[in-house]
Image (spheres, rainbow, N blue to C red):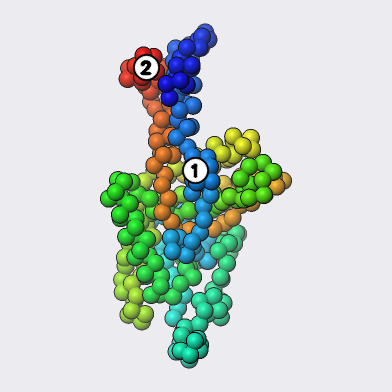
């Protein structure tokens, strides 16, 4: 921090524009920007750039309209969506497995019921949107067990870090690790902070129904992905606005990556624990997000900030 800050502060200042909110503090603003972005991990170790779906730590969905799901969670008072399991098979549909009767493979049974088994969710037209649901590829007891574990891990994360780490990740961008690289990475596009709420007991299955609820926390974009694309590919990721349509945003992303080898948008919905703490800090340290006092920045011209960079 010291070397970069000293270098930036020691540079000769340009004649400030009277309307520039950072006038008189431009070297500090430049140094702060460099230090701010250093908080972001742009390597493959960052799950927000190199996300992996695992059976134990993620919950993926096979049916549901991402745009409708987002609107339900964010725009309505209820802010709650039920998670649907694959219905239990009739006893007559059980199969022989290793000398014992067992439920059929979940994918085979789902297909027999007309339930999709693809985690790639379709894009619907306005006049053909399906009923609101989040269909999981689990039997009722397995879904309850999975949700219970995720809810417990989310509670532990809050107790240990003070921050919610459970998110519904809506949409993913696949892209090369670096220009001309063969390895592909997967990054979530819209992380929605959520919690898992235990609902009513389903007598028919003996399992509890779980609901996904939006916590009401402010939404934050994947700044690690934005900086990675800008730095390595000179690609500006479209800005997601909370009030905008998710479908519109996806179309903007698809236009931005059109013709770029290795880039692909995936319409997937996944619940997982990810840490957004550093990204929130990076966002909060952006002078543009601070109020102005007259035509001066409340952050750049704060006496403590100046003390750190000018001493």
Q: Quadrant of residue 211?
A: bottom left
- Residue density around tag 1, few if under 14, some if 14–19, many if 20 or more, within 10 Å: many
Q: Quadrant of residue 210?
A: bottom left
Near-viewer residue (117 or 78): 117
Near-viewer residue (156 or 115): 156
Residue 53 image position (x, y, % from top left)? 51, 59
Q: Quadrant of residue 285?
A: top left
Residue at 34% x, 65% y is 148
Q: Residue furthest right?
A: 259
N-term mark: 1 or 2: 1
Image quarter where the C terminus lies is top left
Secondary structure at numbered mark 2: helix
Residue at 52% x, 79% y is 105
In this picture, is 130 found above or below 311? Answer: below
Instruction: Measure the C-alpha gap from mark 1 to mark 2.
Output: 29 Å
Secondary structure at numbered mark 1: loop
Residue 38 image position (x, y, % from top left)? 47, 32
Residue at 30% x, 45% y is 162
Residue 47 shows in this picture: yes
Residue 14 image position (x, y, % from top left)? 53, 10
Residue 16 shows in this picture: no
Residue at 31% x, 74% y is 201
Query: Residue 222 got which mark?
Result: 1
Does residue 49 appear left or right of residue 197 in this picture? right
- Residue density around tag 2, few if under 14, some if 14–19, many if 20 or more, within 10 Å: some
In this picture, is 219 found above or below 103? Answer: above
In this picture, is 117 found above or below 98? Answer: above
Residue corresponding to mark 2 = 306
Does residue 288 appear left or right of residue 306 in this picture? right
Image quarter where the N terminus lies is top left
Circle 1/circle 2 CB separation < 8 Å: no
Query: Residue 7 got which mark?
Result: none
């Amino acid at each position: 921090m010291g070397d970069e800050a000293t270098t930036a502060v020691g540079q000769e200042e340009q004649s400030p524009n009277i309307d520039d909110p950072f006038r008189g503090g431009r070297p500090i603003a430049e140094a702060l920007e460099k230090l701010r972005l250093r908080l972001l991990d742009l390597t493959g170790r960052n799950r927000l750039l190199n996300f992996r779906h695992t059976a134990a730590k993620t919950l993926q969905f096979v049916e549901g309209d991402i745009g409708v799901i987002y609107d339900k969670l964010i725009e309505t008072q209820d802010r709650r969506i039920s998670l649907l399991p694959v219905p239990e098979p009739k006893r007559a549909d059980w199969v022989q497995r290793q000398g014992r009767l067992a439920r059929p493979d979940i994918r085979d049974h789902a297909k027999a019921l007309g339930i999709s088994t693809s985690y790639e969710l379709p894009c619907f037209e306005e006049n053909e949107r399906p009923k609101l649901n989040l269909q999981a590829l689990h039997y009722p007891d397995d879904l309850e067990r999975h949700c219970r574990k995720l809810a417990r891990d989310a509670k532990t994360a809050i107790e240990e870090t003070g921050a919610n780490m459970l998110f519904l990740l809506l949409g993913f961008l696949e892209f090369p690790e670096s220009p001309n690289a063969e390895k592909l990475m997967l990054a979530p596009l819209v992380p929605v902070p959520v919690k898992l709420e235990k609902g009513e007991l389903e007598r028919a299955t003996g399992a509890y129904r779980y609901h996904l609820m939006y916590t009401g926390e402010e939404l934050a974009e994947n700044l690690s992905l934005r900086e990675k694309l800008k730095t390595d590919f000179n690609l500006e990721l479209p800005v997601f606005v909370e009030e905008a349509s998710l479908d519109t945003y996806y179309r903007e992303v698809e236009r931005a990556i059109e013709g770029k080898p290795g880039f692909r948008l995936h319409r997937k919905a996944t619940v997982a624990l990810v840490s957004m703490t550093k990204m929130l800090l990076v966002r909060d340290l952006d002078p543009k997000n601070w109020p102005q006092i007259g035509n001066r920045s409340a952050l750049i011209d704060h006496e403590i900030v100046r003390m750190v960079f000018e001493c």
